[in-house]
Image (cartoon, grey):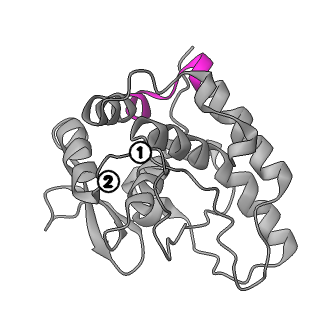
């Protein structure tokens, strides 16, 4: 059964925007050239017509900008040319429902680095699905995925529970199906990078997080 998009009424939490301060290293076993421009091409080929949405790099911070009277497309902006940031921002777009995608940054506000333990727990709760999707996208690219706690100032890394929840969610997606847009993007990435089956459960192990 394929998961549905989440509608505006279903989302009552505060969105925590992921900021990629440095691009994670690729897997040492991968010899592929990982360029964010390839992600832009794959994404835009999939969605520029059907969703009127483009993926673009070069941002000082990631953001989502819905189209206005002066724009032709919705824009997903990722940080600079960071490969991981691009995958993460696409994951957030795939989680957001139709009503959320009409709003700047999906209608959420940003809680900056330096969050309290309680705020960090909320961050981890809302980040499970996008980071599970990002992991699947990364596998489709033969690219190393790293969990992000996005809270360096507070010295709070990703909790074991957070990692376990991402692991279970990723495996759930592989078995039960991704939402439509996430599946389409995953298959496009896998075709581009020559990955035979990004949904193979052997690719998803808790000890890799």
Image point (51%, 27%), residue name: 178
Image point (13%, 68%), residue name: 70
Q: Is residue 53 above or below residue 151?
A: above
170 or 179, nearer to the observer? 170
Q: CA distance from mark 1 to mark 2?
A: 10 Å
* Tags 1 and 2 touching, CB below 8 Å: yes
Q: Position of residue 101 (x, y in %)?
A: 40, 51
Q: Is residue 48 above or below residue 70?
A: above
Magenta segment: 174-183
- Which type of secondary structure does the marked residue at label 1 adopt? loop
Image point (78%, 80%), residue name: 155
Residue occupied by mark 1: 30
Secondary structure character of the magenta stretch overall = helix
Q: Position of residue 172 (x, y in %)?
A: 66, 25
Q: Residue furthest top?
A: 1
Q: Is residue 69 magenta?
A: no
Image point (43%, 62%), residue name: 85
Q: Residues within 10 Å of mark 1 (few under 14, many from 20)?
A: few
Residue occupied by mark 2: 34
């Amino acid at each position: 059964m394929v998961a549905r998009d989440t509608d505006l009424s279903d989302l009552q939490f505060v969105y925590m925007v992921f900021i990629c301060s440095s691009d994670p290293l690729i897997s040492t076993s991968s010899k592929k050239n990982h360029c964010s421009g390839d992600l832009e091409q794959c994404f835009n080929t999939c969605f520029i017509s059907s969703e009127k949405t483009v993926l673009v790099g070069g941002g000082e911070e990631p953001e989502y900008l819905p189209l206005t009277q002066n724009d032709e497309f919705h824009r997903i902006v990722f940080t600079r040319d960071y490969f991981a940031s691009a995958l993460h921002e696409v994951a957030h777009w795939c989680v957001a429902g139709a009503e959320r995608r009409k709003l700047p940054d999906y209608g959420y506000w940003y809680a900056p680095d330096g969050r309290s333990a309680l705020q960090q727990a909320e961050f981890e709760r809302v980040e499970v699905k996008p980071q599970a999707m990002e992991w699947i996208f990364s596998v489709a690219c033969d690219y190393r995925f790293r969990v992000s706690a996005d809270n360096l100032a507070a010295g709070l890394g990703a909790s074991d529970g957070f990692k376990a929840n991402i692991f279970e969610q990723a495996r759930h997606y592989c078995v039960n199906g991704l939402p439509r847009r996430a599946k389409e993007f995953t298959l496009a990435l896998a075709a581009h990078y020559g990955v035979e089956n990004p949904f193979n459960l052997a690719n998803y192990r808790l000890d890799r997080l």
